[in-house]
Image: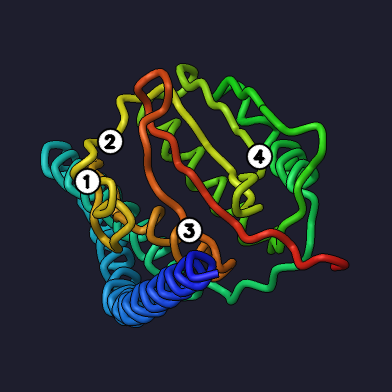
């Protein structure tokens, strides 16, 4: 009896700690979302007049001076390319700032995985996808739209890490007997992530990519936490990255 009480007490402490960590992270991300919203606004405002000015400069460049005309065209191309980069950055900030709330409903995990793969056509020809689903599908509270975004971000990361046409993905689902938690894994054949960065990669604006914004995995973690789940990074059997998502089972009778 004492052992049962101790186990129950330890479990309660663990649940309280997890709830606290979830709240702290979501509050942190909420602050970063507001920062992203303001930053997107400040960057976006001057882009239109800059684009119009460079277009006017290109239009007024004198035809009778080919050398100067070529100089204007070359400079305009550079400016317009950089404007395009900033526009994509603004779009990413805006999407991060406007993340909708999660509204999960009980859903068979196998059905969700197949729906995801159908929606994205198994990422062919960008990725070779293998699926390992249990015969008896677990049921978990899932927001179809938002969890598809999680999987899309993870698969996109894998393709970027390995290169288009070189990616091999494995998507697995299972139930952990001891806790009945539903485990979803996305494994790739990429170079993996150093273990000392396993937690940092979920922080907003932390990235290992030369041109990344560091928002993709922050979005992943926020959505999973709002499902009352957890996400962690491990090493895949072949040495690549394995993202492990744990979701609570759907309530009985749901």
Circle 3 residues within 10 Å: few <14, some 14–19, many ≥20 = many
Asked whether disc 2 touches disc 1, contact meaning CB atoms under 8 Å apart, the reply is: yes
Callout 3: SS: strand
Q: CA distance from mark 2 to mark 3?
A: 18 Å
Q: Tell me, for residue 174, which label it has, or none.
A: 4
Task: Tell me which numbered mark, 2 or 4, is placed earlier along the sequence.
Answer: 4
Q: Which residue is mark 3?
A: 230
Q: How much space separates mark 2 and mark 4, taking CA atoms? A: 24 Å
Where is residue 16, by image quadrant?
bottom left
- Residue sitting at 65 percent across and 38 percent down? 173
Q: Tell me which label, 3 or 1, sits earlier in the chain.
A: 1
Q: Nearer the viewer, residue 84 or 174?
A: 174
Residue 30 image offset from top left, x and y in percent: 38, 80
Q: Residue at x 76, y 38 (%)?
A: 114
State which mark lies toward you, 3 or 1.
3
Disc sitting over residue 98 in the figure:
none
Q: In what element is the residue under mark 4?
A: strand
* Nearest-to-viewer mark from 4 and 1: 4
User: Which residue position holds label 1?
Assistant: 197
Rendered-image quadrant of the C terminus: bottom right
Residue 226 image offset from top left, x and y in percent: 54, 70
Q: Is 150 above or below relative to 133?
A: below
Query: In this orientation, does residue 60 appear?
Result: yes
Place of residue 189 in the rendered image (x, y in percent of width and height, measured from the top left)? 42, 22
Left or right: residue 206 compared with residue 122: left
Give whichever of discs 2 and 3 has the lower sequence position. Answer: 2
Image point (22%, 36%), residue name? 194
Name the colouring of the figure.
rainbow
Residue position marked by numbered label 2 in the rendering:
193
């Amino acid at each position: 009896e004492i052992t049962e009480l101790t186990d129950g007490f330890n479990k309660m402490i663990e649940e309280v700690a997890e709830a606290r960590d979830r709240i702290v992270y979501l509050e942190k991300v909420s602050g970063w979302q507001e920062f992203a919203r303001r930053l997107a606004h400040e960057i976006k405002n001057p882009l239109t007049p800059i684009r119009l000015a460079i277009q006017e400069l290109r239009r007024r460049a004198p035809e009778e001076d080919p050398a100067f005309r070529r100089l204007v065209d070359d400079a305009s191309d550079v400016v317009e390319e950089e404007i395009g980069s900033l526009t994509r950055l603004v779009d990413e900030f805006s999407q991060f700032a406007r993340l909708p709330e999660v509204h999960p409903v009980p859903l068979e995990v196998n059905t969700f995985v197949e729906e995801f793969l159908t929606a994205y056509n198994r990422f062919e020809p960008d990725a070779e996808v293998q699926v390992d689903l249990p015969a008896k599908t677990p049921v978990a509270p899932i927001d179809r739209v938002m969890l598809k975004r999680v999987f899309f971000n993870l698969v996109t990361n894998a393709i970027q890490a390995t290169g288009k046409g070189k990616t091999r993905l494995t998507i697995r689902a299972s139930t952990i007997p001891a806790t009945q938690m539903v485990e979803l894994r996305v494994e790739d054949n990429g170079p993996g992530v150093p273990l000392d960065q396993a937690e940092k990669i979920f922080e907003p604006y932390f990235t290992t990519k030369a041109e990344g914004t560091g928002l993709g995995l922050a979005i992943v973690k926020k959505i999973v936490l709002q499902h009352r789940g957890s996400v962690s990074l491990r090493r895949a059997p072949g040495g690549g990255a394995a993202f492990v998502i744990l979701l609570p089972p759907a309530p009985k009778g749901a």
